[in-house]
Image (cartoon, rainbow, N blue to C red):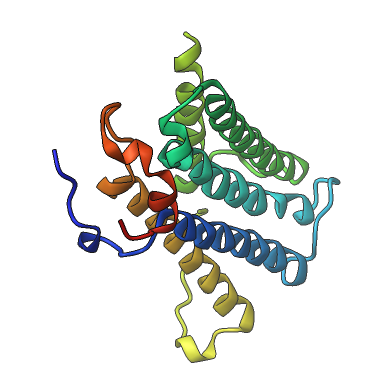
Amino acid sequence: RRHLPATVMWDLPFLPFCALLAVLGFVCVAFVSAWCQYWRGGFALDGSTRTFNWHPVLMVTGMVVLYGAAALVYRLPPTWTGPKLPWKLLHGALALAAFILAVLGLAAVFRFHNEHSTPNMYSLHSWLGLATVLLFSCQLLVPFSASPRKNGTSEYKLLPPEAVFANTLGLLILLFGVLVLGALARPSWKRPDADSPDTRQVPALLWGATR
């Protein structure tokens, strides 16, 4: 079966695309870290609001960036031939690291709430977030067996720099997720059949060299 032309999605080789994703993922982590450091008071482990600041950093790093990287491991053409165990270990390590960071991010929220006698699980965001992490943990086990507030709307030009920065962070995270999904959906980057000539042309697939 012939793949769809590369122009159907993006006419961009896989490895440069992965490099773009890596840079964008790093920028997402840097943005959320800078946001919490310079506008939210920094980080601590004393149960204060600085403890809560670990939550967005760990969630973006784990559930967005590392999990996106884990999902893309099997799109790498070197995984199409040779031993599979090293790639399985890499995929599992990235997924496990994402899960650990997500659990630590949840722990930061619960620690902050308990220190300030704030009820846990009182918002839709908290329930959806916990459900996501629980489903993610189930996914890891299978192979082995917004808080509600009044919205004071202001004109965008009147928003403080922090709000503009946070909105930019949200757009970067959204862009990262869209690019990961696009890479997973692109037919020409999927693992070919064992008898496909694509398995013998890994350099061309990686860098987009013309045949």
Left/right placement of residue 175 relative to residue 22 reads left
- Which quadrant holds the N terminus? top left
| Residue at 33% across, 46% down | 189
Image position of 66 with respect to 21: above or below = above
Image position of 210 with respect to 93: above or below = below
Residue sticking out furthest to the top: 145
Q: Nearer the viewer, residue 145 or 71?
A: 71
| Residue at 65% across, 33% down | 100
Q: Nearer the viewer, residue 71 or 201?
A: 201
- Where in the figure is residue 155, as x and y percent of width and height? 45, 88
| Residue at 78% across, 42% down | 115
- Which quadrant holds the C terminus? bottom left
- Where in the figure is residue 151, as x and y percent of width and height? 46, 70
| Residue at 57% across, 44% down | 66
Residue sticking out furthest to the front: 211
- Where in the figure is residue 49, as x and y percent of width and height? 75, 55
Q: Nearer the viewer, residue 131 or 177?
A: 177
Residue sticking out furthest to the left: 1
Q: Nearer the viewer, residue 171 or 40?
A: 171
- Where in the figure is residue 41, as x and y percent of width and height? 79, 65
Q: Visible in this render: residue 52?
A: yes
How many marks can you see? 0
Q: Quadrant of residue 13?
A: bottom left
Q: Quadrant of residue 109?
A: top right
Q: Visible in this render: residue 122?
A: no
